[in-house]
Image (tube, coloured by chain):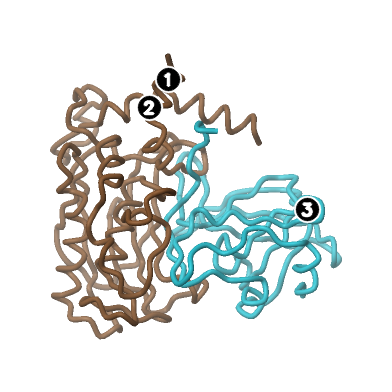
Chain colours: A brown, B cyan
Amino acid sequence: MLLSLSLALAEPHDQMLTNAAGAPLHWATMPIRYTIDPTNTAGLAEAGVVAAIVEAAATWTSVEGAHAEYRFVGTERDAVGGYDDHNVVFFDDSWEVSPDLLAITSTWSTEDGEILDFDMAVNTADHAWALDGDAEVEDLQNTLTHEFGHALGFGHDPADIAATMFASAHPGELAKRDLTESDEAVAIFAYSVEFPETELDASESPSCSTTSRGPGWALFALVAPLLRRRRSELA
Amino acid sequence: MIFLLALAHATLVARGLDPEALAALSTHTAYGDVIAVRTERTERSIFTVATVQSLNAPGTVDVRLQGGCHEGICLTVAGSPTVREGERIFVFLRGDQPTSFAQGFFVVEGNEARRDVRGLDFREGGPPAAVFPLATLLKLAR
């Protein structure tokens, strides 16, 4: 029975990210509040930056049948990221890692995989960005829609090249601003609203309005220890 | 195999880099056996530190990988490679970190060196080759 259920959920299941402890990443509470530091040296208007990022996040919030809710709570200055119970998207003009990297999403979690904090850093030291689909450079909204999927715990879609969560895109691409059915299937798998709200004690997260998890997630949580053991055996 | 979890994470990469391109972006390389792995917590990050017993130079080299679990908290840094004690690795380094995250980090098995780039997002041409002859990398060692 366990095998047949896993087979049925193989595709979205395979797209869940894991942390270094081997646990699948997931949010246990909603909404996911985040801020934006729109300060940038890429020549992007700050109002346009905020609009693009908010739209990128909202793309996931709007998935019917899922309850992955991003909530923009304001702008800030001099954001730097780190584990501070504070989710922020910011531009980094003093990029210290490899210059070929365009952006990095860092996710803090418990060993069990519950996401506590995320940060997205966009490399403006080495790369140009645009808000209007300039064919020569990266489109901020297109890129960050993908990144917001990662921040929900989703990995790459290996099959659907049109998917927002496919692992490749090209400069100026706008298509991945919009989700495909496979993107939405993963969101529904992990964050369906239909799952009974009995998994969490609301008193543990007083600032959160919802504690929903999906039925797919419940099954995944069931088989996750088996998966980790399987990985360990393979290693 | 359907039970294997995706190990992909969320870093964007400008383009796929071959070994020559990695060498051009790197300050030096490390080649050897991982004899110890530990984690370190800094003010804003967690690092997994692999101590490498060099096979082509005297002594050991510490390679710092962004991410890991430390005292109950885990940091998953998008596209950063993972390492296990006992592995033989070849790494292109900028300072003490792999160049271009997982692109510059190879696990050596026999005469082959393999990198796991599934966690990286590629622009301009898609994922690069994952496997190279070890000899190709050793020619670029420094």
Both labels 3 and 1 in a single chain:
no
Question: At label 2, which amino acid type do we have?
Answer: Ala
Measured as percent of width and height from the top left, residue B94 is found at: 61, 73
Q: Of tags 2 and 3, which is closer to the observer?
A: 2
Question: At label 3, which amino acid type do we have?
Answer: Asp
- Number of residues whose C-alpha sits closer than 10 Å to that of mark 1, classed few (under 14), some (14–19) or many (20 or more): few
Q: Is residue A2 above or below residue A114?
A: above
Q: Secondary structure at mark 1?
A: helix
Q: Nearer the viewer, residue A31 or B5?
A: B5
**Measured Cα–Cα span from mark 3 to mark 1:** 41 Å
Tag 2–tag 1 contact (CB < 8 Å): yes
Measured as percent of width and height from the top left, residue B37 is found at: 67, 48
- Number of residues whose C-alpha sits closer than 10 Å to that of mark 3, classed few (under 14), some (14–19) or many (20 or more): many
Read off the chain for label 1.
A
Read off the chain for label 2.
A
Measuring 48% from the left and 69% from the top, which residue is drawn there?
A: B125
Measured as percent of width and height from the top left, residue A49 is found at: 20, 73
Residue hosting label 1: A4
Residue A8: which numbered mark, if any? 2
Q: Is residue B59 above or below residue B116?
A: below
Measuring 52% from the left and 43% from the top, which residue is drawn there?
A: A20
Both labels 2 and 1 in a single chain:
yes
Q: Nearer the viewer, residue A23 or A180?
A: A180
Question: At label 1, which amino acid type do we have?
Answer: Ser
Measured as percent of width and height from the top left, residue A58 is found at: 17, 55
